[in-house]
Amino acid sequence: MKGNRFWIEIITLCAGVAFGLALAIVCAAVVASSGPTLEPPQSAAPPSVRQQTYVGMVTCSRCLARHSAKIGATATDCARVCIRDGAKFTLVDGDQTYLLEGDPAALKRVAGERVRIVGACNRETITVASVAAGT
């Protein structure tokens, strides 16, 4: 009986060591495969889309350029309140309206103002590269 128990312990020990080594090899392979790649980083806009300049008023997707005078707030205050409540930044340029994707802090600074935006347009969304107020 003692002899059988000895062999069972040896087999269990060997199986445990084999399992531990297999786990270590798999972990090493995962770490090696998730290392840095040689691919260039992806930019925000596809390379085929070129940057353009847009001029208009930065506002919110809820009110557009028609902020209610009843609330007694400026266009800037109204846009900021709407953005805080979940609306998106938009650029209104005459009859054209574009959603804006970019730095929220920079867009918030020019909310309610006429601006010049440089960015790439994809359908009705502009990925903003830069924004300048007062144009």
Image (tube, grey):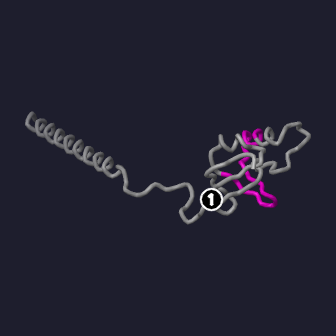
Q: Residue furthest left?
A: 3
Across and down, in percent, residue 79 comes to: 78, 43
Write the residue at 30% across / 45% down. 27
Q: Is residue 87 something that shows in the picture?
A: yes
Please, is residue 91 above or below residue 122 in the view? above
| In-image side of 18 versus 57 (left or right) | left
Write the residue at 70% across / 60% down. 124
Please, is residue 53 above or below residue 28 in the view? below
Residue behind mark 1: 120
Write the residue at 15% across / 39% down. 8
| In-image side of 52 versus 60 (left or right) | left
120 falls in the magenta region: no
Q: Nearer the viewer, residue 34 or 72?
A: 72
Across and down, in percent, residue 84 comes to: 72, 39
Across and down, in percent, residue 111 comes to: 74, 43
The secondary structure type at the circle numbered 1 is strand
**Image: magenta residue range:** 80-100
Q: Residue furthest bottom?
A: 48
Locate residue 15: give its quadrant: top left
Q: Nearer the viewer, residue 96 or 53?
A: 53
Q: Residue furthest right?
A: 70
Write the residue at 82% across / 42% down. 75
* The N terminus: image quadrant: top left
| In-image side of 5 versus 74 (left or right) | left
99 falls in the magenta region: yes
The kind of residue tagged 1 is Ala
Q: Is residue 60 something that shows in the picture?
A: no
Q: Nearer the viewer, residue 18 or 55?
A: 55
Q: Residue furthest front?
A: 135
Across and down, in percent, residue 37 comes to: 37, 54
